[in-house]
Image: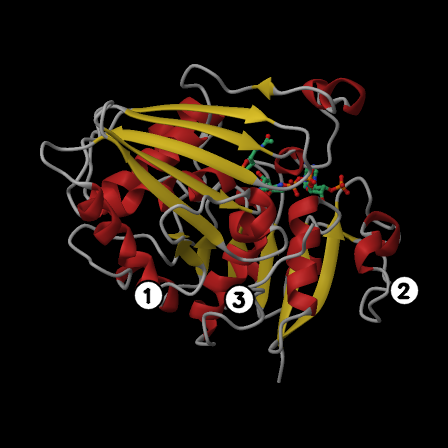
Amino acid sequence: MPVSVAIAGASGYAGGEVARLVLGHPDLELGALTAHSNAGEPVAAHQPHLAAHPAIADRTFAPTTAAELAGHDVVVLALPHGASGAVAAELEATDPGCIVVDVGADHRLADPQAWRDYYGSEHAGTWTYGMPELLHAGETTAQRQRAELAATRRIAVPGCNVTAVTLGLQPGIAAGLIEVDDVVAVLAVGYSGAGKAPKANLLASEALGSLVPYGVGGTHRHVPEILQNFAVTGAAGARLSFTPVLVPTSRGILATTTARVREGVTEADLRAAWDVYDAEPFVHTLPAGRWPTSGATTGANTALVQLALDARAGRVVVTSALDNLVKGTAGAALQSLNLALGLPETAGLPLTGVSP
Ligand SMILES: NC(=O)C1=CN([C@@H]2O[C@H](COP(=O)(O)OP(=O)(O)OC[C@H]3O[C@@H](n4cnc5c(N)ncnc54)[C@H](OP(=O)(O)O)[C@@H]3O)[C@@H](O)[C@H]2O)C=CC1
Ligand SMILES: CC(=O)N[C@@H](CCC(=O)OP(=O)(O)O)C(=O)O
């Protein structure tokens, strides 16, 4: 029997990408597709890239209510920040047995004060973090997070920028090769990360020819989430300067993260640490001399990583690239869901992308 998956927020970018991956997954089938202002509208009108699929062709969006979402094996919440908590609580009351995967931020942070500081509302709770590759302190391969995901029914999928920076730097933290009191991350990010809803800094006429910084000065809400991940890997009390820059592309993130290396650390030491990803199906440290591009990940559930020792600066420079809607959201959601369902972790997930 296929596993039924309902998607709340299926009219959005993240929900649409979850739907695309569910349609290509051998063990899953699409259940309810819900929306907010577009409830009652044809799915094909809002997700035209899915319209040719027979499971989509004649469907309309249902309203996002617990009654519509209950009765499925899995519910994926792809809602704006702050909207998941109430729906999740209603589901807990009406259908406690289903697996719920939240691709929004509501259940990611463990510290309620950090949530209030950065999101300005009440904390909804903390769920199992949906990053299978997250290294826990003392680990040489990522097993603990996988074990936690295999035992859970509630998954909080990481932020896309968070995934890029965490996967980029964590091998150096795990191996004890870097200082974490001065980590600097600058990210080039595509527009789809901001969702479909219109925003003042996202007017196409102004943005298409321009590079636009935002969330500058330590204000971006991904800062506490990245620091939380660094702490899991063994670096409590890290300091991070984080600056995203919108670039005129639809999908993709290229993060450049640098940190001071400890005295005597060589490039060979660093490369050996980043070989931790040899064991990973979706995260790859590229051969020396080849640098990741966001385009090489488009449509794939991959994250590509490369590093160099800047000996004059005494810093490691790590670049990491991913597709914000795949490894940064929907792919991570299904990878974590595969673990929770006891399916092969890689089932239904694209290893190859599209190019150019
Ligand atoms: N885009 C990305 O790359 C990533 C997104 N995420 C997260 O995924 C979630 C969805 O983002 P994204 O798809 O980009 O956003 P979109 O704006 O594209 O989609 C938002 C979805 O939520 C619905 N919605 C809007 N307002 C409400 C509300 N008040 N109550 C219930 N539903 C509502 C919309 O319905 P309708 O259109 O019918 O109004 C739509 O289906 C967010 O939490 C985002 O942070 C996480 C990682 C990456
Ligand atoms: C371009 C853009 O605005 N990108 C978003 C990334 C969205 C994301 O990762 O999702 P969460 O909001 O669920 O954390 C941002 O930087 O806030």
* Mark 3 CB lies closer than 8 A to ligand 1: no
Q: Write the residue at 62% across / 50% down.
A: 298
Residue mark closest to the camera, 1 vs 2:
1
Using the numbered discs, state the Cα–Cα distance from disc 3 to disc 2 in whole angstroms: 26 Å
Image coords of residue 313 (percent x, y): 25, 23
Task: Tell me the residue that label 3 is attached to.
Answer: 98
Query: Residue 309: which quarter of the image?
Result: top left
Residue at the spot of label 1? 279
Rounded to the nearest angstrom, the CA distance separating label 1 from label 3 is 31 Å
Left or right, residue 214 beside residue 20: left
Measured Cα–Cα span from mark 1 to mark 2: 43 Å
Name the secondary structure under disc 1. Answer: helix
Question: Residue 19, percent across and down?
Answer: 69, 60
Q: Residue at x 37, y 63 (%)?
A: 280
> Foreground: 122 or 14?
14
- The residue carrying pointer 2 sits among few (fewer than 14), some (14 to 19) or many (20 or more) residues within 10 Å by Cα, namely few
Q: Give the residue furthest to the bottom.
A: 1
Determine the secondary structure under disc 2. loop
